[in-house]
Amino acid sequence: MAEPVDFAQNLKQQADIVRVIGDYVKLRKSGAVNFTGLCPFHNEKSPSFSVHVTKQFFHCFGCGASGDVYSFLQKIDNISFPEAVKALALKLGVPMPKQAFSGPGEAADAALRGKLIDIHERATAFFQEQLRAPEAAKAREYLAGRGLDAENIARFRIGFAPDSGFALRDRVRGSFDDHVLRQSGLFSWKDRDTDPEGVNTPVANMYSRFRNRITFPICSEQGKVIAFTARTLETGEKAGPKYLNSPETALYSKSRVLFNLDKAKEVIRKVEYVILVEGQMDCITVFTSGFQNVIASSGTAFTETQVQLLKRFTRNIIVNFDPDTAGAAAAERSIAMLLEEDFDIRLVSLEPGFDPDLFIRKKGKDAYREVLGKPQRYFDWLIERALKMFPPRSPEARVKAINYLLPHIQRIPNAIVRDDVAKNAAQKFGIADQILRQQLRDAAGKRSGTIKSAQASGNTVAEKVLICALTDAANPELRQRAVEAVAAELHRGLNNESMIERLSSISLETDPMSLDWDDAQRQELAGVLIHGHEDVNEALLDETLYTLRQRRMEQRKRELNAEIAEAERRSDSGRLGQLLAELKQLEREQRPQ
Ligand SMILES: [Zn+2]
């Protein structure tokens, strides 16, 4: 049986880091061995994040984030090494050996999650089947009224939870252990408050959480059903909430999921923006009308995790719900979070009383396309709103309007954009007064936390060539010559002397990026590997070694001259003769043959 470490190594060799990272970062080819994109670990406008194809590592020249496919997954998903191995195995469809788990607890955890996915799959199929039953006539009618045809019902795997408390339980009971049923979130029991794990409640006393409701699966980013949101078909007092959601489980955490991202993500990447709507029904209607880059916020404010998740696909967002209405506070908080992450936010406002679902059903998708085509920049919308709230007829109103706008403006991470918005606001409010204008811009100028840009590399060309040759596993001869040059001490006095020495002593099989360099060295090494490799050949190495040899000889000449002066001062003629001979020899060597 394979050891966990071997398994991780083998798996890493099967993976293509470019494809794995490509799931999170939009990458562009920018060299023979190199892809670049916007770093997911810090805010930036122009790409300083590189992925090396042959050496299979990533490196950000902006923030210094660096490592292999596992460190990437660990960092971006905030998971442990064993979890990163599991995640990669899942992505590649490679089954995990049991030994690869770090402990029995973790294995049990993974096993439970696997079972929970299975039970959700079974429940989804069950609900889909029930939607065809006579009892579901009202549900089918509702869906038809929403303009959903059989194809789209199947696509979103919409189903129906019958009014029975036991039908689903009895269907799945034979296939799953009781604890899986208890922890699935699909069932409920009396005293859930005092007995949240259900340990004192036999499964026989458990009943369906969703009854007489239309079920909409909530999927993980990979498209696996992990929870449900279910709309009631009852009216009146007994109906309960209009939408009932699965509770948090080992599988499902509301704050980590974006509704419909699994189906939308490819299109979001392609068209380079995302449409955000409020409700799941809105989302489904917009999607099925041909605008597939749509996700739903489900009426709550974005969490940090969700914003980070979305950022992997785009930073351009069109928000299609009125931040003024019902979910105003949630929408406002979401927008604030998006602003801080440097999203380009635009709004489309539909006529009062319309949500996207109703709008498309009443006016058609062409009308919706038209609205989407002219979104308003968020700050233009905000300034308009401030103008309405505080018509700038008096200096007091102007001050109020500015005070209203300032906190929003200060959230913009980019100083140039911030200043621009502040100027624009001052103009719209007719603030001619230089002092007030300056105040506005000063306040807008206050924002810290910008990431300092990468230090310009102080490497000389010769160092780069030497480092390239030393790390070029594809060209052992070139490497051997570089190793000999180091043995001849030609690298002495270079900035990265110690690094070059170390590189010359490792074996060809060792991945140089895997060594424990300090941050500056890692930065140098990554830069050389990413930007230099393909250009280094025999001729360039020859030239470099010649230069280094000359440099070394010049240095020795300076030393000799100093020693000669010293020997003359001491009238040490024996020593003087020796030194002069060496100098003569050196000059002869320096002359081209
Ligand atoms: Zn970075």
Image (cartoon, rainbow, N blue to C red):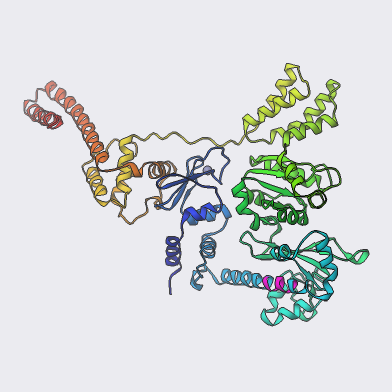
Which of 176/559 is in front? 176
Question: Which portion, as a residue range, is magenta?
Answer: 121-127
- Quadrant that contains the N terminus: bottom left
Most common SS among magenta residues:
helix
Q: How many marks?
A: 0
The C terminus lies in quadrant: top left
The answer to if 333 sits in the magenta stretch is no
> Which residue is depicted at the point 46% across and 60% down?
15
Q: Left or right: 296 with respect to 67?
A: right
In the rendering, at what x and y percent does residue 383 appear? 77, 31
Please determine whether, in this image, residue 439 is positioned above or below residue 467. above
Magenta segment includes 122: yes
Residue lying at 69% horizontally and 60% vertically, measured from the top left:
253
Please provide percent x and percent y for residue 87. Answer: 54, 62
- Please tell me which residue lies in front, 172 or 42: 172
Which of the 4 image quadrants contains residue 546?
A: top left
Nearer the observer, 480 or 4: 480
Which is nearer the eye, 277 or 358?
358
In the rendered image, is residue 200 in sight?
no
Instruction: Identify the residue shown where x is 65% and y is 54%.
Output: 264
Please determine whether, in this image, residue 328 is positioned above or below residue 221: above
Q: Evaluate whether residue 211 shows in this view.
A: yes
Q: Which residue ends up furthest to the bottom in the rendered image?
A: 174
| x and y, in percent, of residue 42 in the image | 56, 43
242 in relation to 440, above or below: below
362 left or right of 514? right
Q: Residue 412 falls in which quadrant of the image?
A: top right
